[in-house]
Amino acid sequence: MQNAAVAEMFDSIADLLEIAGENPFQIRAYRRAAEAVATHATPIEDVPAAELRAISGLGPATSDKTREFLATGRVAFLEKLREEYPRGLLELMRVPGLGPKRVQQLYRERGISSVEALQESIANGELTGLAGFGGKTLAKIEDGIKRLGELSSNLPLIDALPLANLVARTLADVEGVERVEIAGEVRRGCESVESLDWVAQAGDAKAVIPAFLSLPFVQEVLETTESRARVRMRPGIEATLHIAPSGGWGSALFFATGSPAHVEEARNRNAELENYSDETELYAALQMPFLDPELREKTGEWDLKVRPNLVRISDIKGDLHAHSNWSDGSATIRQMVEAARARGYQYHAITDHSKALAMANGLNAQRLREQAKEIAEVQADFPDVKILRGIECDILRDGSLDLDDEILHELDWVVASVHSAFNLDEASQTARMIRAISHPAVDLIAHPTGRILGARAPYAVDVAALVEAASEFDTALEINASQRLDLKDEHARMARDANVLISIDTDAHSTRMLNNLEIGLLTARRAWCEPKDILNTKPREELLAWLKRPKSQK
């Protein structure tokens, strides 16, 4: 699936145009194109060339560049920009505290074109006297470089899972292939993956391996044997197809799924695990119940006597964090609710941004009351889906909320989140968020650590203290089913163990993004969550009753 690669291409163009100081309208057009392709429901390479312009967000120029990229793997316009501006400038753009204007200034006035060169210049005092780069700014940039270095270069699950599914579907259609399953880190639901794996069973392995090697997104063949093929795929990730021997499907799938620590423990318990036809038989030989892939990390699963009832996608009754075109979403309230009903949901929350997020067209009290009229109109046409009138309210620097209590208490549902002042020290950031958790109107804290996988490290915050406060004030915490995956599995398990309810939400800004729920679901399963641990598994009437709970200080 080339959606992620095409979107990355458009974002790279936009970044370089920003550094060049080009027309902001042109830059926004490339940003819109990146979002349109990234969130498109089907593989972009499957869209007929003549129909690309029908995708909202793609215009004549971006459609042409999409076709060029899919045909050649490159775009001449981007190559020309890269000749003028070194690749390292894009890495500099990822450093917190450095926007395009500062990156351009560093490049033009000091010749700095990489993170390493910037570090060296700061260490040698070479930026002294450069306008806008005082001591405090340089200290923040140094901290930003440190946090950038902590980010994983692995492929986020939100990008890895669609690619893994596409390959599995493609191989399943190859003549002679009996079955194909995703394995490895993706099957275990890891938040980001170093490699992709599949297991296939076929009457003739000589047919399926060439089909795998000929996939259009294979960049390089690394190794082939009779039992496996290893390649590098766009966007640069290693991928392996494992061929299961006759009668050994379960064993092959088990070993290809991992984790290494889990497999090692299994080997220690029983060295003869090679020829099982399914994984249930293999676990029976280990005197264990079947362990779901998400549990296989050697974090206590070997002590289980009964298989946990992990939450499933069919358990989810609604999405409690989603946006409309009243703020920065691309769809109307009606379109979002239609999409929610198509998923079989019993309720759907409209949680547009509050006024502090001006760049997202955030709502003040007056606009929230105007929005209520549209919600009422749509609700009349969708009696089977309860529309929760909500807000994603910014938590301000001191922990107060962006809207007055009067309007907050008018709403059905209040989500609070941080979108600013990421650089507070841990004590201040934690106190800020606990104040919001304790607010009588707040029902949910969204993306509690602020991270974006591969793009932004979490801010400094004491998650254990947040969980303790959430327990005390009966406030739910979110697993944001996007590139954030925040809470991460470790923190979600901490919340589960403290009996803090977790909401798995997409933070959808379009109808297509509602499909990202599976990403958050996998994280919840890795946290050993059962339906009782998840707020939005509650049927509609139970959720509405929960919303009337006597919250502390309410």
Image (cartoon, rainbow, N blue to C red):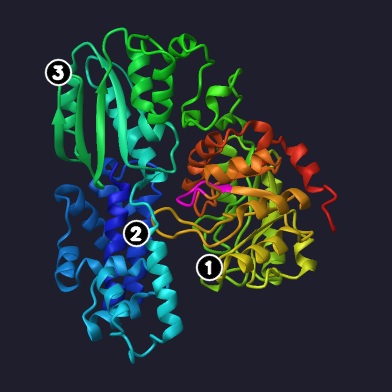
Q: Position of residue 424 (x, y in %)?
A: 56, 70
Name the image quarter holding the C terminus. bottom right
Question: Front-most of 244 and 411?
Answer: 244
Between the C-alphas of marks 3 and 2, the distance is 40 Å
Q: In percent of the image, x 34 and y 46: which residue is there?
A: 155
Q: Amino acid at mark 3?
A: Lys
Of helix, strand and loop, which one carries label 3? Answer: helix
User: Residue 33, which numbered label?
Assistant: 2
Check disc 1 and report the residue beneath it: 422
Q: Residues within 10 Å of mark 2 (few under 14, many from 20)?
A: many
Instruction: Single out the mark in the foreground, 3 or 2.
Output: 3
Which segment did they paint magenta? 479-485
Of helix, strand and loop, which one carries label 2? Answer: helix
Residue 14 visible at all: no
Determine whether 502 is above or below 255 in the image. below
Question: In terms of image quadrants, where is residue 53?
Answer: bottom left
Between the C-alphas of marks 3 and 1, the distance is 53 Å
Of helix, strand and loop, which one carries label 1? Answer: loop
Could you tell whether 459 is left or right of 249 in the image? right
Cβ–Cβ under 8 Å for marks 3 and 2: no
Q: In percent of the image, x 43 and y 27: which residue is there?
A: 262
Q: Is residue 480 magenta?
A: yes
Check disc 3 and report the residue beneath it: 206
Determine whether 246 is above or below 337 in the image. above
**Magenta region, main secondary structure:** loop
Q: Position of residue 18 (x, y in %)?
A: 31, 74
Q: Is residue 472 magenta?
A: no
Q: In percent of the image, x 33 and y 89: which residue is there?
A: 128
Q: Which circle's residue, 3 or 1, is located before the other in the chain?
A: 3
Q: Amino acid at mark 2?
A: Ala
